[in-house]
Amino acid sequence: MSTRTYWTELAAPVGPLLLTADPDGALTSLSVPGQKGGRTVQGDWRADPGPFRAAAEQLAAYFAGEPVEFRLPLRAEGTAFRTRVWDALDAVPYGTTTTYGEIAARIGAPRAAVRAVGGAIGANPLLILRPCHRVIGADGSLTGYAGGLPRKLRLLTLEGVLPPASPGEDGTQPGPGDQQTGEQLRQHA
């Protein structure tokens, strides 16, 4: 017997957000197009914006630049190790960054577990809500992000971790592909 999955899609500055929830209304995923390991709508899912009203309101405030601490019921399935890593992500405040090594230390894992921590962060099914975009390399580099480095850059800029990029020489506004250096991250972390 399978559990019903509810879904909705929300427009956002980083592209459409696909949200899923279980029958109790707990969010089970937030995916973006092209996300490594992201979800796609299945035929037996039920489209219903009802379970997502609070998430839509909080995400709208977040994308408006308000420092939101998401207060939503989350239910992601993962191993005990992944769950510990995801819980540590929840403790990374808006507008700050941390490193993979710092996450490993927070959960009591040895330094050698940094790669495993990175794997757990990469498997986070709740992008943005569980802020894996706030994790950077020890040298200040952006490193990976399942939603793509351009989105990570946009989210960190939105949170004020990075300064807005300058308009391009062609007069266009900076887009999600513009790069920031590790030095800029270290200065604003």
Image (tube, grey):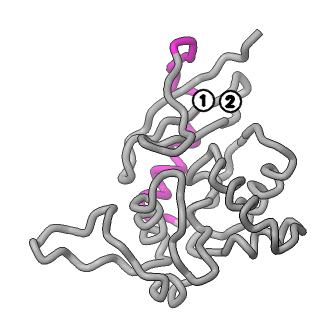
The structure residue drawn at horizontal position 48% and vertical position 69%, both measured from the top left corner, is 156
* Relative to 152, residue 101 above or below: below
Name the kind of residue labelled 1 in the image: Pro
How many other residues sit within 10 Å of disc 2, few (<14), some (14-19) or many (≥20)? some
Q: Is residue 51 located in the magenta-colored stretch of the structure?
A: yes
Q: Which mark is residue 25?
A: 2
Image spot of residue 47 (x, y percent): 50, 20
* Residue with the most extreme left position: 170
Q: In which quarter of the image is the N terminus?
A: top right
Image spot of residue 62 (x, y percent): 49, 58
Q: Residue 51 carries which label?
A: 1
Q: Give the range drawn in magenta.
A: 43-66
The structure residue drawn at horizontal position 54% and vertical position 33%, both measured from the top left corner, is 39
CA distance separating discs 1 and 2 = 5 Å
Image spot of residue 100 (x, y percent): 69, 70
Which label's residue is closer to the chain start, 1 or 2? 2
Image-quadrant location for residue 143: bottom right
For label 2, the SS is: loop
Name the kind of residue labelled 2 in the image: Gly
For label 1, the SS is: helix
- Using the image as rendered, state which of residue 116 and residue 160 is in the foreground: 116
